[in-house]
Image (spheres, grey):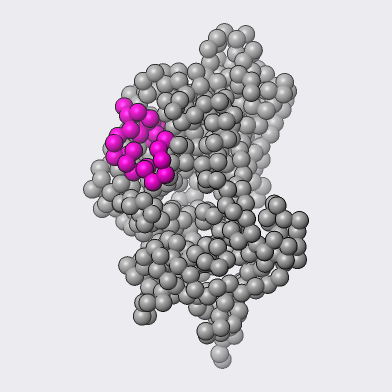
Amino acid sequence: MTDGVAVLGAGMHPWGKWGRGFTEYGAVAARAALADAGLTWGEVGSIVGAVTVRGGYPGYVAGASFAKALGWQGARVASVYAACASGAQAVDTARAQILAGLADVVLVVGGDAAPKGFFRPVGGDRPDDPDWLRFRVLGATNPTYFGLYARRRMAVHGDTAEDFALVKVKNSAAGALNPNARYRRRVGAEEVAASAMVADPLRLLDICATSDGGAALVLSSMEFARRHGVADPVRIRAVSTVTPRYPSTVLDLPDIATDSTVAAEPPDGSFRASIARAAYEEAGVGPEDLSLAEVYDLSTALELQWYEDLGLCAEGEGAKLLREGATALGGRIPVNASGGLASFGEAVPAQAIAQVCELTWQLRGQAGGRQVEGARVGITANQGLFGHGSSVIAVR
Amino acid sequence: MARSRRPAVDEWFAGEGARFRLLGTRCAACAAVFFPREDTHCRNPACPGGELTEVPLSPRGRVWSYTDSRYRPPSPYVSDPELPWEPYALIAVELAAERIVVLGQAVPGVTVADLAVGMEVEVVAGVLYEDTGTTWLTWHWRPTEVAV
């Protein structure tokens, strides 16, 4: 592994429900990242867009949409779709171009204008599409899968609804300190308990909202960073994009059934755990080296699962780690110092990039009231529908 | 005129009454089982690839987990917007012989309050929705110890 690539700039469009197009959010974030890097768009040799899907051409061909909005200047272009992992794959594509010597500086952009309410498949009769089928035959929305995982944790590990609510309490306290977050109000446990049940045992405040938002990064070779006067940049040391291993035994979105383990023993550890393991191996670090983690808290219960999958604690000990305060700001290993999806909501192709923005600000010591003291190593983790892994490790 | 009865998805299940079964496929080379059915290639990466033949799945299993849907799901789920929404439970069921977990709706009337992880359930034919000419059939899981 090389020393990695440099993060020269990070930028966001605030999350919310703004009612505008995804290109605008991405372009605003891109301009902020360029300004942060001290570069002009004209100096960028390549742009990679993370793709959203809203009927017709996916994301209206995202990389090119952002390039056009910023002004055509002849840059190399790529567009990447990997559901929730799109942002990480966009970072990976940019990194590969830099390490291969195809580009010195790459702009990575994601933006989304999410629909209100449940995510749903695009229209039409598509009985060969597993995502369409799980809605058609089972009415299985994304929150119902979160509910299945949560109920399973309660049965196997003894987690309680109160444990889940504590995740929201923790993340809302961090989000209240983040100017880019959509929800900037502390939420109490009683408020979670009083919110409407969505998919038993999860309530409205256990589940992340859909949002609009944008995030962007300027990545470069280490050599370019030095020439540009940045001697000690935040560096990306690993990008995990692994797929699951057969037989996959966790009922994952949008599956109707798991793989059977009749013909082959299941692999060691879950798919989510393998995403993190690949990142640790590539970066040459372990969970004990982490200063902070940004994980995909689609639901409060899922955040506890990530603690275990990232190796922050043993299996089944997630709720205990939370109750000890270890994962809160000021704790041993803060998780979702940004406020997480609980505070941002989900803007699919932007979120994995936004996680890296947060690591960048934290590792530079620029995170204001939510700063993790002396942060040196950070990890992001998420999982894209249909078998896309996503984890990024950044260091300083 | 009586509606015709048709599966909501072709070839995923068959039979009436006590003979109702989910249908998967099994690889002749490695014995892997697939549901929903896999008819093209065996997906076991260690398998040289064998013929895939239809196999009925075990009718009974145990609850791996469960939840429900308190809000009306979006299309393509079919429901009558004129009627008040009635939540249904979803059950993920572990089949011991096939070593697989299969998701399905619970029979109408069974709520999350009736369910527990580990409880035994059996597969039964159910109605997904009806339109003018057709009753569209699906599979439901029914707890063997709960009277409905």
The spot of residue A154 in percent (x, y) is 35, 54
Q: Residue furthest left?
A: A190
**In-front residue for pair B34/A342:** B34
- Vertical side of A192 occupied by B117: above or below: below
Give above or below for B15 relative to A254. below
Question: Where is residue B25 shown, x and y percent of the image?
Answer: 66, 68
Q: Is residue A380 visible?
A: yes
The answer to whether residue A169 is left or right of residue A133 is left
Q: Is residue A212 visible?
A: no
Q: Quarter of the image containing the N terminus of chain A? A: top right
In reply to whether residue A50 is colored magenta, the answer given is no
Residue A324 within the segment the image draws in magenta: yes
Q: Main secondary structure of the magenta part?
A: loop
Task: Say which residue appears at 30% left-offset and 51% top-offset.
Answer: A160
Residue in the foreground of this view, choosing between B72 and A56? B72
Name which quarter of the figure residue B90 lies in. Answer: bottom left
Which segment is the magenta one?
A312-341
**Residue B122: percent from left, percent from top:** 47, 75
For residue B26, side relative to residue A205 (left or right): right
Q: What residue is shown at x 66% (from left), y 47% (from top)?
A: A57
Q: In the rendered view, would you say B110 is above or below A314? A: below
Image coordinates for residue B21, horizontal then vertical, percent: 57, 77
Q: Residue at x 52, y 19 (%)?
A: A234
What residue appears at the point 57 percent right and 66 percent down from the top-left corner? Answer: B98
Q: In the picture provided, is A40 more to the left or to the right than B108?
A: right
Q: Within the image, what quadrant is residue A235 found in?
A: top right
